[in-house]
């Protein structure tokens, strides 16, 4: 081998510590070792401290009796149930308020986002005022506002606001009739299931027929007719096997029916309206991101405005809207932990609050609670990322 | 479909003009964009419109399919007058195809879907029938092999040819071109112009806003020069280029030639 630089001979080897691969490997190994060492120190130190103070560790507390009541439970619960059950009750309450909140916020957001772009002066102004007010006031303040300023000043149960003798609103909550299903009602559920199947196949048939013959079918109207009509017919034929249990004033409060506690109402209202304002802006930005040329091209080939919006504008706007929608859904779910402020029994209030105080097992309780929020959030974002991928544009 | 097919050629031939614009004015707020435009376009005529930027060329042809609204005067396309009546607007848009400077293809749909969306939703055709027509026109603009790709995967010249095919699918009797080659790289201009020349040879009525003077010389029956929202001069291409009458026309031609 000569020293000719063009001969293609391997260059003289640099010293080991001057090679980039060696260096980066060393630094990464050092970093990992450091992180593991710190984690190990924190873990053993915590265990040691807990032991010294006589605080037991482990998840044994989950099967101990809780001994406290919870304001709203979606599953059977009283003081004799375990701490494990309080976890479940809190989790379900969190899922309830997050699920309803995401649904309502999305609805409000899409309506208000489109409204803000309306050519109708009044509608556009109303939407603008709504958005600018509610996204610029702290969420905690809004929750307190709905709870203390709107719902608490409502009349006592005895002077309840009476809406048609069936719905009652007072400072203890919103009372509505509860459905009582009688023997024959299963037939109605079966009829509904059949209707859903029929509509599914009919929609497929209608789409195929349109692709083959071009005839369009009023799928939406016929579907609605089947979905409501069939169960209704069966319901009437089975002798209306459904009664409503009306809430009634007994002593100092209402008994019977379904109760929506003011804590849930305040939290849900605040979360939906606050997050809805952000979603409205996301929707508006998505629609504005589609260039006006798209609308013009659609009009130029003869498409009507409604078809243009549905087939050309919205599908393109979604790719801008979805990522922002995802983070708003995640925000709403995590913000639901502000429930503590008004005493709505969500996971944080019940489990990371009362349960933690009574058992003192902070590490386990906090870890479980964090794990839950992490799981919910990752589930939402996985789903939304999948949906986003479906809507992405193909380029190159 | 059948009624428009049969009624179209004879009817308009008898009335003489496919497009009649009479005393049209347009304002953007205070700004007077179009001033007293009068123009008759006969069937099969190929008109090139040129002029400095901001002279109202694009605005004028965009009035013909109501992408812009005129405030005074009359526009009659194939016997239908453009008014606020949605039915008239729909009818005229079915007869008038348009090609834009920036193509404006629908990026979320494939090339073929771009071509057939209006056939399905406006002409109410079956998908199979529409796809046959779509493929026919993609072959005409010589890119049938790209049918399943998305617009973002094509070159600018290919996209513009798809845009032309998309318009032709609706079987228009008039085609409007709004600077169809201005956004293209030089080597792609020719493929689009070739497609347009081929279209002109098939007897299509065409209005082109363009600065391609070579195209004007070979294809146009008439060249129209606009400036400041007015039609300054119109003439046959040979006379227009060799012997412009108006000072502003001379100035413009000296700048671009």
Image (cartoon, coloured by chain):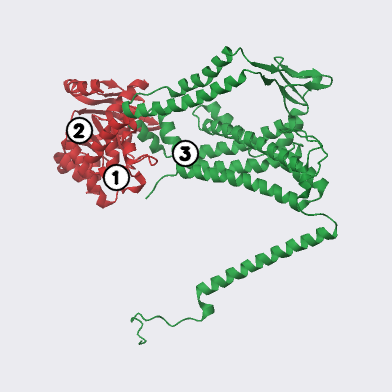
Query: Which residue shows up at 54% across the image and 73% down it?
Result: A23
Local secondary structure at mark 3: helix
**Horizontally, is B71 left or right of B39 in the view?**
right
**Residue B188 place in picture, x, y as percent:** 26, 49
Query: Which residue shows up at 16% across the image and 35% down it?
Result: B202
The tint chain B carries is: red
**Residue B223 place in picture, x, y as percent:** 20, 37
Give the chain letter at badge 3. Answer: A
Identify whether B222 is placed above or below B155.
Answer: above
Local secondary structure at mark 1: helix
Query: Which residue shows up at 51% across the image and 23% down it?
Result: A194
Give neighbour class at mark 1: few <14, some 14-19, many 20+ (Cα, 10 Å). Answer: some
**Residue A295 place in picture, x, y as percent:** 39, 34
Specify the quadrant of the image occupied by residue A108. top right
Mark 1 or 2: the one toward you: 1
Identify whether B97 is placed above or below A238.
Answer: below
């Amino acid at each position: 081998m000569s020293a000719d630089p063009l001969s293609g001979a391997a260059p003289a080897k640099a010293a080991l510590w001057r090679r980039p691969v060696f260096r980066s490997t060393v630094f990464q190994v050092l970093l990992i070792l450091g992180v593991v060492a710190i984690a190990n120190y924190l873990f053993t130190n915590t265990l040691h401290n807990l032991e010294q103070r006589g605080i037991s560790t482990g998840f044994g507390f989950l099967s101990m009796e809780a001994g406290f009541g919870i304001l709203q439970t979606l599953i059977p619960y009283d003081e004799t149930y375990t701490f494990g059950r309080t976890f479940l009750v809190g989790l379900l309450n969190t899922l309830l308020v997050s699920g309803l909140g995401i649904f309502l916020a999305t609805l409000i957001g899409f309506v208000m986002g489109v409204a803000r772009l309306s050519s109708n002066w009044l509608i556009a102004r109303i939407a603008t005022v709504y958005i600018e007010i509610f996204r610029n006031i702290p969420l905690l303040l809004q929750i307190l506002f709905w709870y203390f300023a709107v719902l608490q000043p409502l009349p006592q149960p005895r002077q309840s606001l009476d809406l048609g003798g069936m719905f009652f609103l007072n400072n203890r909550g919103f009372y509505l009739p509860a459905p009582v299903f009688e023997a024959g009602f299963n037939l109605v559920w079966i009829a509904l299931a059949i209707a859903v199947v029929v509509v599914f196949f009919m929609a497929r048939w209608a789409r195929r027929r349109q692709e083959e013959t071009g005839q369009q079918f009023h799928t939406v109207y016929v579907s609605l007719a089947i979905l409501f009509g069939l169960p209704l017919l069966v319901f009437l034929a089975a002798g209306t096997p459904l009664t409503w249990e009306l809430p009634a004033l007994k002593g100092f409060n209402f008994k019977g029916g379904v109760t929506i506690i003011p804590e849930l109402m305040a939290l849900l209202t605040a979360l939906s309206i606050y997050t809805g304002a952000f979603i409205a802006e996301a929707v508006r930005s998505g629609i504005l991101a589609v260039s006006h040329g798209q609308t013009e091209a659609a009009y130029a080939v003869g498409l009507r405005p409604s078809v243009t919006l549905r087939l050309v504008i919205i599908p393109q706007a979604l790719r801008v809207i979805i990522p922002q929608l995802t983070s708003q859904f995640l925000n709403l779910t995590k913000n639901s932990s502000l429930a503590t402020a008004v005493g709505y029994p969500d996971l944080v209030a019940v489990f990371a609050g009362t349960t933690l105080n009574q058992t003192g097992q902070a590490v386990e309780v906090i870890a479980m609670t964090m794990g839950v929020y992490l799981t919910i959030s990752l589930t939402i974002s996985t789903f939304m990322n999948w949906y986003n991928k479906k809507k992405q544009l193909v380029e190159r | 479909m059948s009624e428009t097919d049969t009624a179209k050629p004879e009817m308009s031939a008898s009335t003489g003009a496919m497009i009649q614009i009479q005393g049209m004015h347009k304002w953007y707020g205070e700004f007077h964009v179009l001033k007293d435009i009068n123009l008759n376009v006969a069937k099969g005529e190929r008109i090139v419109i040129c002029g400095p930027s901001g002279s109202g060329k694009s605005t004028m042809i965009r009035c013909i399919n109501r992408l812009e609204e005129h405030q005074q005067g009359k526009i009659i396309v194939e016997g239908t007058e453009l008014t606020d009546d949605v039915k008239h607007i729909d009818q005229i848009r079915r007869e008038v195809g348009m090609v834009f400077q920036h193509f404006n293809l629908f990026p979320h749909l494939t090339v073929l879907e771009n071509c057939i969306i209006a056939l399905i939703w406006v002409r109410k055709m079956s998908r199979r029938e529409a796809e046959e027509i779509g493929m026919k026109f993609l072959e005409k603009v010589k890119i049938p092999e790209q049918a399943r790709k998305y617009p973002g995967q094509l070159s600018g010249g290919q996209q513009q040819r798809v845009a032309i095919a998309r318009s032709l699918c609706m079987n228009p009797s008039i085609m409007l071109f709004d600077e169809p080659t201005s956004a293209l790289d030089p080597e792609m201009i020719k493929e689009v112009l070739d497609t347009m020349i081929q279209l002109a040879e098939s007897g299509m009525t065409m209005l082109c806003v363009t600065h391609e003077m070579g195209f004007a010389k070979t294809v146009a029956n008439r060249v129209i020069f606009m400036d400041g929202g007015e039609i300054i001069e119109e003439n046959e291409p040979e006379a227009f280029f060799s012997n412009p009458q108006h000072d502003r026309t001379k100035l413009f031609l000296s700048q671009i030639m």
